[in-house]
């Protein structure tokens, strides 16, 4: 605790209370119903996009998958020296959907 004038002690107290209150418990936000989409794709370095949002290399989502709202979604993959591919998929609440896409190499 700081030594010094009462004003400094009071300021220290206010800052401490503020910092403690910032880390308080927050009510978790319910994301609503979800379904899981897992990927079996080649090449593993292909970049995954879902509904035009770039997620990163598909290998990151092979085991864990991606949680999506039920309904239709646009999945696309692209990789250097390969033709890109897009698929429309249907996600069902509480179910696992497996997407298999093998990109074809661009001929030399």
Image (cartoon, rainbow, N blue to C red):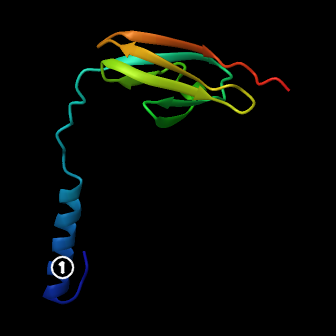
Instruction: Tell me the quarter of the image containing the C terminus.
Output: top right
Q: Secondary structure at mark 1?
A: helix
Query: Residue at position x 56%, y 28% from top?
Result: 60
Instruction: Tell me the quarter of the image containing the N terminus.
Output: bottom left
Judging depth in this view, the residue of 5 and 38 nearest the camera is 38
x, y percent for residue 17: 16, 65
Query: Residue at position x 30%, y 12% from top?
Result: 94
Seen in the image, is 66 located left or right of residue 70?
Answer: right
Q: Quadrant of residue 96?
A: top left
Judging depth in this view, the residue of 68 and 108 nearest the camera is 108
x, y percent for residue 3: 24, 84
Seen in the image, is 1 located left or right of residue 7?
Answer: right
| Number of marks in picture | 1
Query: Residue at position x 47%, y 21% from top?
Result: 64
| Residue tagged 1 | 11
Query: Residue at position x 44%, y 24% from top?
Result: 74
Judging depth in this view, the residue of 52 and 95 nearest the camera is 52
x, y percent for residue 87: 50, 18
């Amino acid at each position: 605790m700081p030594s010094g004038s009462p004003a400094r002690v009071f300021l220290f107290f206010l800052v401490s209370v503020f910092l403690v209150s910032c880390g308080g418990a927050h009510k978790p936000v319910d994301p609503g119903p979800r379904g899981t989409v897992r990927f079996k794709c080649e090449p593993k370095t292909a970049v995954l996009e879902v509904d035009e949002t770039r997620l990163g290399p598909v290998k990151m989502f092979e085991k864990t998958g991606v949680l999506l709202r039920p309904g239709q979604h646009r999945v696309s993959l692209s990789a250097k020296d390969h033709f890109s591919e897009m698929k429309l998929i249907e996600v069902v609440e509480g179910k696992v959907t497996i997407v298999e896409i093998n990109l074809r190499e661009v001929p030399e």
